Amino acid sequence: MSKKNKARWSLLPGIEPTPMDLKIMEAQEHGKLVPTRDLIKTPKQIEGIRKAGLLNTAVLDHVAEHIKEGMSTLEIDKLVYDFTTKHGGIPAPLNYCGFPNSCCTSINDVVCHGIPCDWEVLEEGDIINVDCTTIVDGYYADASRMFIIGNADAEAKKVVQVAWDCLKIGEKVCEQPYVYVGDTAKEITRLAHENGCTVVRDYCGHGVGVEFHEDPEMEHYGKKSRTGMLLVPGMTFTIEPMINLGDYECCNDEEDETGWIVLTEDGSLSAQWEHTYLMTENGVEILSH
Ligand code: MF3
Ligand code: CO
Ligand code: CO
């Protein structure tokens, strides 16, 4: 076998193959993308990620308690920074590839990676995603929620609900192991389209835990099942579909010098929810709530 075609998964010498080994080997023989061994977390790593998930959830609960009309997104950022560090965590976004703050705050037509700032103030009818990632003892957990400020119109409420339903349907596909990333994408895409919404294609979910962004790439848009990576027990990853009311295309905010902020190209509303999951023998467990 040439180096290029080296198998991603191979049996451990001198050790009886496990049922998981056999399932992965079979998928690999059928040309499927299978994980490498380092993507299967050890019990110690899982405990670490679980702990990071608990603090990350507490951070988002803290935001949920305080977020309100008239508050600036920089005040949200301060809530996140202060709470996280007070409880022994590190906000992963801060200084990550030049990101200047402790969380992402994405309002209305901002798809993701919105940067908190003092002149951006929450108004009645806004929808905002707050995306937090927390490091505890070197382990990462990543989750985001939508908040609706006061009374919002029906369209705004709809996109928030559809994004939630898309997360939940992705999760439902993972109620057993040995499904593929493409199986989750197919269901998410079907549900979004059935509801007259679109799925952002330029950004996806990801493996998470030992690093902020690891393999696999968790695509949310797709039409073909049994594509993408096989999801096996011990893998930790996010599902975080970004759902637009209008077209799926995204663009950069031209006024943003950091290049981080992502907008819908047509100015339509966008919503997103995210959890960190552990795949187990009995399907996914949410590690971020
Ligand atoms: N939390 C985002 C995600 O879900 C990533 C944000 S990167 C940052 O993957 F630098 F903008 F924080
Ligand atoms: Co996130
Ligand atoms: Co993420």
Image (spheres, rainbow, N blue to C red):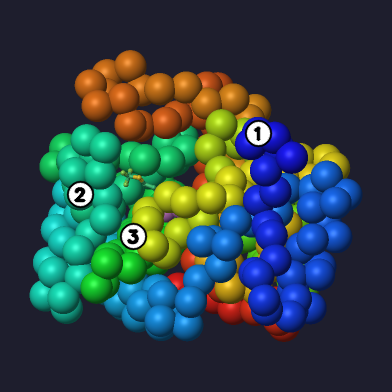
Looking at the image, the residue that sits furthest to the front is 14
Estimate the x, y position of residue 264 in percent, counting from the top left: 51, 28
Amino acid at dot 2:
Leu
Within 10 Å of disc 3 (Cα), the crowding (few <14, some 14-19, many 20+) is many
Mark 3 C-beta closer than 8 Å to ligand 1: yes
Estimate the x, y position of residue 72 in percent, counting from the top left: 20, 49
Identify which residue is drawn at 24% across, 73% down: 137
User: Is 70 situated left or right of 114 in this image?
Assistant: left
Within 10 Å of disc 1 (Cα), the crowding (few <14, some 14-19, many 20+) is few
Label drawn at residue 133: 3
User: Is 94 situated left or right of 5 in this image?
Assistant: left
| Residue 105 higher or lower than 138, as above or below | above
The residue labelled by disc 1 is: 4
Mark 1: which secondary structure?
A: loop
| Residue 46 higher or lower than 185, as above or below | below
Is residue 274 or residue 281 the one in the foreground? 281
Looking at the image, the residue that sits furthest to the top is 254
Amino acid at dot 3:
Thr
The residue labelled by disc 2 is: 94
Q: Is residue 251 visible?
A: yes
Quarter containing the N terminus: top right
Identify which residue is drawn at 70% across, 66% down: 11
Mark 3: which secondary structure?
A: strand
Estimate the x, y position of residue 206 in percent, counting from the top left: 52, 51
